[in-house]
């Protein structure tokens, strides 16, 4: 079964701690994306990667970091510099020529207290 | 500047009645437009897409949308709502400026009453 997996589904952290969210895909997609979803605000792009070892900032990259060492993996680290980290985080992937057809993972709900 | 506005944050319909979810966009370039659906605590699923072919686009689960350039709209419709349609719906614009920019609307929550 091809798809995208995100783990864990729920994550709780204390303020001041860095936390890494996992995203893995076996769709052989070149492009991967991280979005943040807050109530009433839709999705906002944090980072995206078009190819291994390359990534670009999205609209709200401050306080986040990513790596793309393997095609199938695109982990997101939420650092202590992120002022409001509590949110639902969604990872997606697509082929490079059909970026509109993004396949989404089930999401990780991060709560920081 | 490019933007997308979903005109209703919540829509409530009775089962078996028509659904209309409204979306207006603003784009300096000929855009591609999409609708995604999200069920509670799940990822998003592509419902349908408009990429400059036919202006009336049919998607999955009986949904369709019509691109109206003169009105800068891309409203989502379904003739008869089903309980399983209850979800959040996002209108998405990709302006053809190159790059990977995708612009999501704020979402419309659809409630379906029995």
Image (cartoon, grey):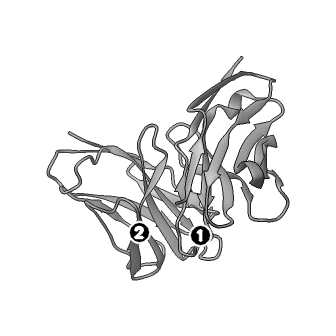
Q: Which mark is residue A44?
A: none
Pinpoint the chain carrying mark 1: A
> In this rendering, is residue A57 above or below A87?
below
Residue A41: x %, y % from top left: 45, 43
Q: Residue at x 43, y 37 (%)?
A: A39
Q: Quadrant of the N terminus of chain A?
A: bottom right
Q: Which residue is mark 1?
A: A27
Left/right of residue B86 with respect to residue A92 in the rendered view? right
Q: Nearer the viewer, mark 1 or mark 2?
A: 2
Left/right of residue A22 with respect to residue B20 in the rendered view? left
Q: Residue at x 83, y 56 (%)?
A: B55
Residue A70: x %, y % from top left: 42, 78
How crowded pointer 1 is (Cα within 10 Å; few <14, some 14-19, many 20+) is rated as some
Q: Which residue is mark 2?
A: A74
Left/right of residue B64 with respect to residue B30 in the rendered view? right
Mark 1 and mark 2: Cα distance apart in space: 13 Å
Residue A20: x %, y % from top left: 29, 59
Residue closest to the eye, A23 or B107: B107
């Amino acid at each position: 079964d091809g798809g995208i997996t995100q783990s864990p589904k729920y994550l709780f952290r204390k303020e001041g701690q860095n936390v890494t969210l996992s995203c893995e895909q076996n769709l052989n997609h070149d492009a991967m994306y991280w979005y943040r979803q807050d109530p009433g605000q839709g999705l906002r792009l944090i980072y995206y990667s078009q190819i291994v070892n390359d990534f670009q900032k999205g609209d709200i990259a401050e306080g986040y970091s990513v790596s793309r060492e393997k095609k199938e993996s695109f982990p997101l680290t939420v650092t202590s510099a992120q002022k409001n980290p509590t949110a639902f985080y969604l990872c997606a992937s697509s082929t490079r020529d059909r970026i509109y057809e993004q396949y989404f993972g089930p999401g990780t709900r991060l709560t920081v207290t | 500047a490019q933007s997308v506005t979903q005109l209703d944050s919540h829509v409530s319909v009775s089962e078996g009645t028509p659904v209309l979810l409204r979306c207006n966009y603003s784009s300096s370039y000929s855009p591609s437009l999409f609708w995604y659906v999200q069920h509670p605590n799940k990822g998003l699923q592509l419902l349908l897409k408009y990429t400059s072919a036919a202006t009336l686009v049919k998607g999955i689960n009986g949904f369709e949308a019509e691109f109206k350039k003169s009105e800068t709209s891309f409203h989502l419709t379904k003739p008869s709502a089903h309980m399983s349609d209850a979800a959040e719906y996002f209108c998405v614009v990709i302006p053809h400026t190159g790059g990977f920019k995708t612009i999501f609307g704020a979402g419309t929550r659809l409630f379906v009453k029995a």
